Image (cartoon, rainbow, N blue to C red):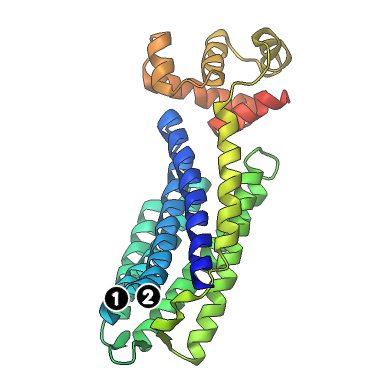
């Protein structure tokens, strides 16, 4: 049964890596900052998944897998989970375009270093090598309280942002991410309450099923489909596109040229080179186009064009 769970986890990781790859391809192609920030948090969680599978595999198949190795991998996983939350907050603060997000991120990063320093100190965790048990202390309680507080803050930001993008193409993208995050939140809350009653974990418990892997995989499939459609040329005539869509928004001749290049899958650098413009000028034109059409990203623009609305 344990090996079947590992096989499932490996399949989930493959889906996650595929979703991450296509997201990164979109970032390299367009330079979209919000997708880049998404890749950071999704990539960190993927590493957490990899470490989870690695710990399971080592405990089941490697005779020399020591308690100290397990302890180190567990500590790294806990730290990365904290990093996922910080990356999620950064992603959402950037989506809100909050001007003070840099000091806020600095504060959250420093607070994470402090509380996880307490976790890794003698008052946070103690390894019983003989019995292969990690006993948690007050340092762990502080770190877990920080984690749940930061996670709650991220969830509030996320659901609040969904209201802002509900009428846009990105609604499905954010909704899927929030469902995935909500399952992880409930799973983390359950772990928080469980360890509050019994503040320890055994090496034998590494085979536990990670519930959040299900929405992680499903969301990964959605991300693949979501971005893949932008890499596939749409079956629409250019003249029809201009007359039926762009004519409604007062688009200038230069803006039409840039929209056509975007529609053809060109990056900002490609557009600048082909139209003999600077990249900064291309970005300015795109900003004006977004304002006229009522979108705030490249993939919202493409989705709106494809829908003809």
Mark 1: which secondary structure? loop
* In this rendering, position of residue 166 left or right of residue 84: right
Residue 65, numbered label: 1
Mark 2: which secondary structure? helix
Give the Cα separation between the discs numbered 2 and 1. 6 Å
Identify the residue at image location x=44%, y=41%: 21
Disc 2 to disc 1: CB gap under 8 Å? yes
Identify the residue at image location x=51%, y=22%: 265
Which corner quadrant of the image does residue 83 belong to? Answer: bottom left
How many discs mark residues in the rendered view? 2
* In this rendering, position of residue 294 left or right of residue 269: right
Mark found first going from the N terminus, 2 or 1 = 2
Q: Indicate whether 73 appears above or below 158.
A: below
Q: Indicate whether 53 appears above or below 272.
A: below
Q: Position of residue 31 (x, y in %)?
A: 42, 32
| Quadrant (top left, top right, bottom left, bottom right) of the N terminus | bottom right
* In this rendering, position of residue 37 left or right of residue 218: left
Q: Where is residue 185 in the image (x, y as percent from the top left)?
A: 56, 68
Viewer-side residue, 143 vs 203: 203
Q: How crowded is mark 2: few (under 14 residues within 10 Å), some or many (20 or more)?
A: many
Q: Indicate whether 130 appears above or below 271.
A: below
Residue 59, numbered label: 2
């Amino acid at each position: 049964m344990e090996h079947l769970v590992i096989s499932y986890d490996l399949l989930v990781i493959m889906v996650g890596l595929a979703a991450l790859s296509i997201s990164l391809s979109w970032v390299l192609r367009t330079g979209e900052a919000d997708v880049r920030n998404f890749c950071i948090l999704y990539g960190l969680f993927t590493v957490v998944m990899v470490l989870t599978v690695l710990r399971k595999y080592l405990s089941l198949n490697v005779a020399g897998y020591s308690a100290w190795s397990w302890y180190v991998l567990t500590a790294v996983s806990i730290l990365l989970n904290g990093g996922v939350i910080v990356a999620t907050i950064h992603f959402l603060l950037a989506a809100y375009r909050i001007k003070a997000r840099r000091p806020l991120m600095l504060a959250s990063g420093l607070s994470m270093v402090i509380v996880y320093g307490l976790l890794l100190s003698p008052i946070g965790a103690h390894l019983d090598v003989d019995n292969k048990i990690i006993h948690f202390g007050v340092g762990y309680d502080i770190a877990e309280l920080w984690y749940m507080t930061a996670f709650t803050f991220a969830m509030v930001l996320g659901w609040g942002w969904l209201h802002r993008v509900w009428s846009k193409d990105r609604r499905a993208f954010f909704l899927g991410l929030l469902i995935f995050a909500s399952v992880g939140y409930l799973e983390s809350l359950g772990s928080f309450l469980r360890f509050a009653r019994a503040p320890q974990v055994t090496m034998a418990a590494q085979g536990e099923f990670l519930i959040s892997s299900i929405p992680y995989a499903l969301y990964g499939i959605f991300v693949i489909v979501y971005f893949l459609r932008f890499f596939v040329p749409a079956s629409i005539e250019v003249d029809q596109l201009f007359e039926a869509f762009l004519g409604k928004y007062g688009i200038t001749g230069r803006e039409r040229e840039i929209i056509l290049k975007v529609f053809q899958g060109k990056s900002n650098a490609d557009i600048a080179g082909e139209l003999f413009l600077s990249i900064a000028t291309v970005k300015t034109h795109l900003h004006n186009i977004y304002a006229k059409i009522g979108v705030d990203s490249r993939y919202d623009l493409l989705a709106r064009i494809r829908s003809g609305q």
